Amino acid sequence: MAENTEESAAAQETAVIQDPQAAKNAQLLALLHRLFGADAFTDVEEPYGMLTATTTRERIHAIIAGLQQDQELQLHFLTTMCGIHYPENEGKELGMVYHVHSLVNNLRLRLKIYFPIADPTVPTLTDLYAAANWMEREAYDFYGIIFTGHPNLIRILNVEDMDYYPMRREYALEDGTREDKTDLFFGR
């Protein structure tokens, strides 16, 4: 039995040596658990080598503020912030995805939050990142997500009198009544 344990430990060490990104992600996850508690994150995974975790909208501002201010991590760059819509997830139809990056440490982290479409409010990050201003306005414009505390939450890419949110999966991708194109040329 001791041989199996030693072999398992050796195999894990070899895997970490072969995949340095996995080692970085393990260290980052351990640090996140130490800073915010293990209960702050669910659905932890590593698609394409990027550490991804889900948290709640009540905690997202404090977590991202803590990550930005942490001297060890130095996650000072908000790469992406975008809305998502999964109408089949009852009670969690809408969501936001945040990508933060440390240029100094070459660390990337993806955080997700989900919330009901009936209550599409999320705290703003404009007090932490100036770039959040545009990204939040875009998410509002296309998904109807309301960012509490945003300084100027208005439509920026669609007309102001539009009464729907075009990126929600409530609308067909194409007009089903079109007759000017045939599926023969489009591989369908």
Image: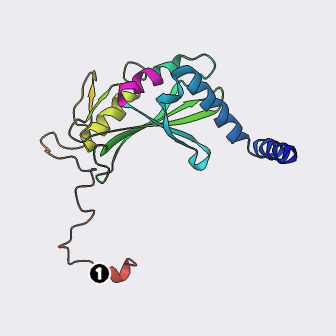
For image coordinates 36% across by 23% down, the residue present is 126
Q: Nearer the viewer, residue 26 or 176?
A: 26
In the figure, residue 23 lies in which quadrant?
top right
- Residue 36 in sight here: yes
Give yes or no for residue 62 being in the magenta stretch.
yes
Give yes or no for residue 186 being in the magenta stretch.
no
For image coordinates 87% across by 46% down, the residue present is 3
Q: Nearer the viewer, residue 187 or 67?
A: 67
**Under tag 1, what secondary structure?**
loop
Q: Is residue 111 left or right of residue 150?
A: right
Q: Nearer the viewer, residue 119 or 97?
A: 119
Q: Check the image and report above or below for 118 versus 123.
A: below
Locate residue 128, reporting x and y percent.
42, 20
Q: Give the total number of marks visible in the rendering.
A: 1
For image coordinates 24% across by 25% down, the residue present is 152
Locate residue 143, reporting x and y percent.
27, 43
Could you tell me which quadrant the C terminus lies in? bottom left
Locate residue 57, reporting x and y percent.
36, 30
Colour scheme shown? rainbow
Locate residue 124, reporting x and y percent.
33, 25
What range of the chain is rendered magenta?
A: 57-64
In the figure, residue 14 lies in which quadrant?
top right
Label 1, on which residue? 182
Amino acid at circle 1: Thr
